[in-house]
Image (tube, grey):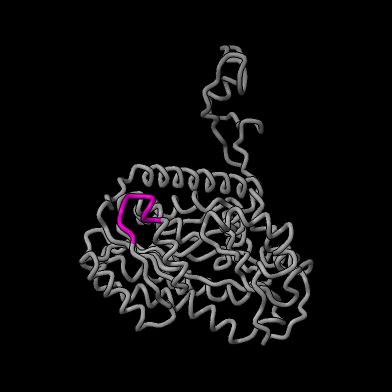
Amino acid sequence: MPVVRCWKPVRAGVGCGRRTASNPRVKRLAAGTWRRPTECQPKALAPGGRMIRSTVVAVLLAGSALAVGLRIRRRRTPADVMGCVALVTGASRGLGREVARELTDRGVHVVICARNGDQVLDAERELQESGGGEVRGEVCDVTDPRAVAELIDRVVRWRGRLDIVVANAGTLMVGPLSAQDTEEVQQASDVMLWGVWHAITAALPHLRESEIPRVTVVTSIGGKVPAPHLLAYSVAKHAAVGLSEGLRVELADEGIPVTTVVPGLMRTGSHLHARMRGRPGAEFRWFGLAAVVPGLSMRAERAARRVVEATIRGDAELILGAPAHVAVRAHGLAPGLGTRAAALVHRVLPRGADAPEHEGVRGVATEPGRGIVGAAGRPSARRHGQHTD
């Protein structure tokens, strides 16, 4: 066995021995014949210990990077959007209406559009009374590319520019797979995928001329994780997430940031207008409760403020609501576990009864919609333009 020198400094009464002239250990150390005691030998970490240490280091580095990133984002000076012109689709009610309000409060001139002319006029009148930027209402079906192109032309003729596009139009159907069909998926995709595509591509020539162009696509937690009894909706929203993230890559060199907004449940009263299939009353009961419970759902005013702030900063992504954050992160880390959890939820939801060709029943028209569950959502519905008459 080779001789091992103990290079560790030895102090009196500490370590390998007492440092005295008469101490034989010290003499052997000086002569180079001292073999390092076992307790002084460096101990190798067991594989498990090395793994724990590596994990701790990785977590600390990731936490530090996150903290630095958040600090940089907070220090980023928001663009001055006063006097800019924005188009918000699906803005006659709900989150879109609140986003339009938040923009006008910041001095942005806003064009809102939706399919229902009466609701557009009502929203235009209310938003104009709130002051700030000017508001113009337009009737437009975003599934029609020609109608969208004509809308963009009218916006530019109105103020001579277009700086911000918020693609928010959506539709919602709740029910099991047995009550859905190809047409339902196609209709959802026409609004929430192709409607986004039509609006953004038609606006791009004008956005390229803007000094501070911004694009925001409002998707959903259903576009990030599988949501039971929302298959057609989830298909369209997953496609919208892919489109939004892809556009951010494609337009980065042109200086046009695209923000993907991922809302969880919000207290807008939109569940009163969702189409319920299968067993409409039972479907409305569970979905309506989830949409009005604080903690599970988020106030639309707060969500709209954060959407506008993220849009102005040009953030890549905004996830709204703590439950949505948890669901997205957990599904990203363990997708198998996430799908199993969703499957467990699916087991306790109502089983289908309607045929796929059944058009569904508006939530407000169901028995629970006329009862306590519906009543719980009506204050939010009235506040955000969700007419329930």
Q: Residue at x 40, y 59 (%)?
A: 125
Residue 127: name its quadrant: bottom left
Up the image or down, 45 lies above or below 222; here it is above
| Residue closer to the observer: 244 or 377 | 377
Q: Quadrant of the N terminus?
A: top right
Number of numbered discs: 0
Up the image or down, 374 lies above or below 9; here it is below
Up the image or down, 23 lies above or below 265; here it is above
Q: Quadrant of the C terminus?
A: bottom right
Q: Residue at x 42, y 56 (%)?
A: 126
| Residue closer to the observer: 55 or 44 | 55
Q: Residue at x 75, y 67 (%)?
A: 367
State left or right for residue 204 relative to residue 32. left
Residue 341 in view: no
Residue 49 percent coordinates (x, y): 64, 45
Residue 157 percent coordinates (x, y): 22, 71
Residue 79 in view: yes
Q: Is residue 163 magenta?
A: no
Residue 106 percent coordinates (x, y): 33, 49
Up the image or down, 233 lies above or below 14; here it is below
Q: Residue at x 71, y 58 (%)?
A: 373
Q: Write down the region rendered in magenta.
A: 127-135
| Residue closer to the observer: 318 or 272 | 272
State left or right for residue 252 relative to residue 193. left
Residue 134 percent coordinates (x, y): 30, 57
